[in-house]
Amino acid sequence: MTYRDIASKQVLTWACTAVGARMPVAMAPLALVFLVRERPGGYSLGAILAAAYVIGEIVGAPVLGMRLRPDRARFHLAVGLAVGAAGFAALGVFPDAHAAVLAAFALVAGAAPAAATGGLRTLLTTLVPERAAAQALSVESILTAGIWAVSPAAVAGLALGVAPSVPLLLGAALMASSVAGLRLLPAAWGGDGVDGGGGVDGVGGVGGTGGEERTGGTLLRLLVGAWPVYVMGAASLALLGLAELVLPALLEQRGVGVGWSGPLLTGMAVGGGLGAFVHGLRSWPGRLRTRSVVLMAGTSACVTLAALIPDKAGIAVALVVGGTLQSCAMLTRNLSLREVLPPSALAAGYSVMYAAAGAGYAATGSLAGALLEVAAPSTAILAGVGLTLTLTAVGWWGEARRGDGSARDADLAVTSGHTPSVGPAFPVAPGPEGAAISGGGDSEGGL
């Protein structure tokens, strides 16, 4: 498949809507620091507000993502984005409010639209042919990389050149525009196993008459069962957080100007976009979990080299290559979710992945921050790499164990002449992915 398979007016509309929804998310942490930096203890307060925003995202994504109903997707997403826009606007309009009030606004701005990432990703894959799902996810990653490359410069330029509150007001306007953009997209997404009440049909016997409690319980079991995918997803973003948070201190250790951290991180984001583009050009050999491990090992090696290389040119090359591999690793995680979750649970699954990735980012950053008090920046990076590799190994073990359980379950089904309704293997989408899983092959074999 090629990118021509996803070229359509609806996908373009989706892209414009996604920019409006995600640009404020990329701008928020730095914008919050600039908002209060001139107040007494401004940088510490900015860090607290940024933490409140991230906590809102981590909590809001799984909670609200599980409540997304495929038959009313547009309504749910619009409400969350509208409340998020109000949170951003409140931060921009009341920059001198008490710190606790600003923290509450930041929490709302992070939590309310947190399910939009998973919902918009699911919506995108319904706008393209099933065979082009990998290309669609690659386009999403390219778009995200572009947003994260542009956002820091936009925030700094507006905050310093116009006013500290302008980036947050712009974020509010962009998020409000995404609500308008949603009206040009389908009001719901399709998928097997969706009943009129938002339940999951055919999973553990839950259907339109199964009741809300049973439906929610089944969805929760499905999401918990996919934990290895989330662990490896957290590992993939942990390295990005490690590079972003420790890079200024590392450059100072190497005698390089701290101002180079911005261009170097932009190069890493550009590398991520390039990796996503190349990933979508063709189907790749090997199981998804194996490819994830290889890509994560390569990313870890690049970050390790960045910690050990003494000159900025070598650090730049390591970060660009690392960003390229990291974006491909994250794409394999999103494709893995399509293997293990039914279509009706994908929005919730993507939302949980979003929260897991944020948790991985925060955990590695916290570890590195603590180590910076007692160790050199290069040592802190190496410790973070060690934590990332540990998470990768745990995730691979869990996926391999689930795969072995699926194979045993399939053998049992053939022997007994029936297919169990709930077991180690999850229901899968029809078409290329489902066929690949049933045959023990790669989910992208038919893409």
Image (tube, rainbow, N blue to C red):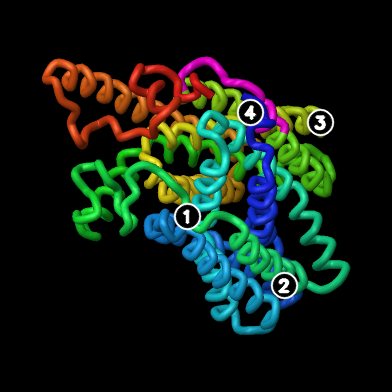
Residue 169, numbered circle? 2
Q: Residue at x 75, y 67 (%)?
A: 167
Q: Nearer the viewer, residue 163 or 256?
A: 163
**Which one is in front in this view, the residue at disc 2 or the one at disc 3?**
2
The three-letter amino acid code for the residue at tag 1 is Ala
* Residue 304 visible to an observer of this rendering: no
Q: Quadrant of residue 382?
A: top right
Residue 240 in the image: state x and y as whole percent: 62, 41
The three-letter amino acid code for the residue at tag 3 is Asp
The three-letter amino acid code for the residue at tag 2 is Leu
- The residue at which mark 4 appears reads as 280
Q: Residue at x 59, y 40 (%)?
A: 380
Q: Residue at x 68, y 26 (%)?
A: 278
Q: Residue at x 34, y 45 (%)?
A: 223
Magenta segment, which residues? 274-287
Q: Image quadrant for the N terminus?
A: top right
Residue 188, numbered circle? 1
Q: Are marks 2 and 3 in contact (CB under 8 Å)?
A: no
| Helix, strand or loop under label 3 | loop
- The residue at which mark 3 appears reads as 311
| Helix, strand or loop under label 2 | helix
Lower sequence index among marks 2 and 4: 2
Can residue 409 be found in the magenta stretch?
Answer: no
Lower sequence index among marks 1 and 2: 2
Going by the picture, which residue comes out furthest to the right? 161
